[in-house]
Image: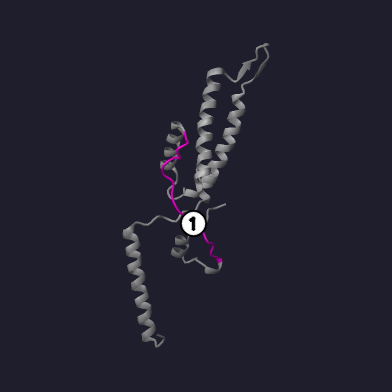
Amino acid sequence: MPRRNSLAEKKLKGTDRSDRAVDVARADGSLSEPPAHLTDEQADMWRWAIEHAPRGVLHAIDEATLEDWVCARVVLRAAYAIVERDGQIIYTPNGCAQKHPALATIVQASKILHTAASRLGFDPVSRTKVIVEPQKTEEELEEEAKWDRLAGNFKQTVNRLNGRG
């Protein structure tokens, strides 16, 4: 399924239809510093995620989901290290072979990690579904306002010349 065109793309192509307009939920605030209760390793992972996340996707409302992703990734790495050190099969004190308990941790942490990644737009499939309006600089906003004023003045002049205003 192809991704949806942004409103800007629709306006540019002339395919924008107000009767089909869908409001995009906009969240306020952004994420930057990790919560104080995270460990140093988790805080480093948090900063890495903020730095490498798609621009404009993470907002303050996403803090809990990002925390899930961060913690799951740290737990997953630790579990992989344990399995690498001990092996996938361990032996009980009575000599019976069994799967290493850390393998179950890997499965659970992977599920949490992939779910959170999908919700945050961190994987290629979910990233194609995320529509992010580009962030405009102060200069771009001023330039746009100038052109809006000019277009408004032009419309008023045309209406006045046509006897409508």
Q: How is the image coloured?
A: one colour
**How would you classify the magenta stretch by its main secondary structure?**
loop
Query: Is 29 in front, or is 85?
Result: 29
Q: Is residue 37 magenta?
A: yes
Depicted 158 relative to depicted 21: above or below: below
Q: Residue 110 location, x and y as percent?
A: 57, 34
Between residues 94 and 121, which one lies in front from this camera angle? 94
Locate residue 108, reporting x and y percent.
60, 33
> Amino acid type of disc 1?
Arg
Instruction: Please give left or right for residue 92 compared with residue 158 in the image.
Output: right
Q: Is residue 72 above or below residue 101?
A: below
User: Which one is in front, 2 or 114?
Assistant: 114
Residue marked by disc 1: 26
* Quadrant of the frame with the C terminus: bottom left
At a point 44% along the width and 35% down the height, the residue shown is 43
Question: Which region shows up in magenta?
Answer: 20-38
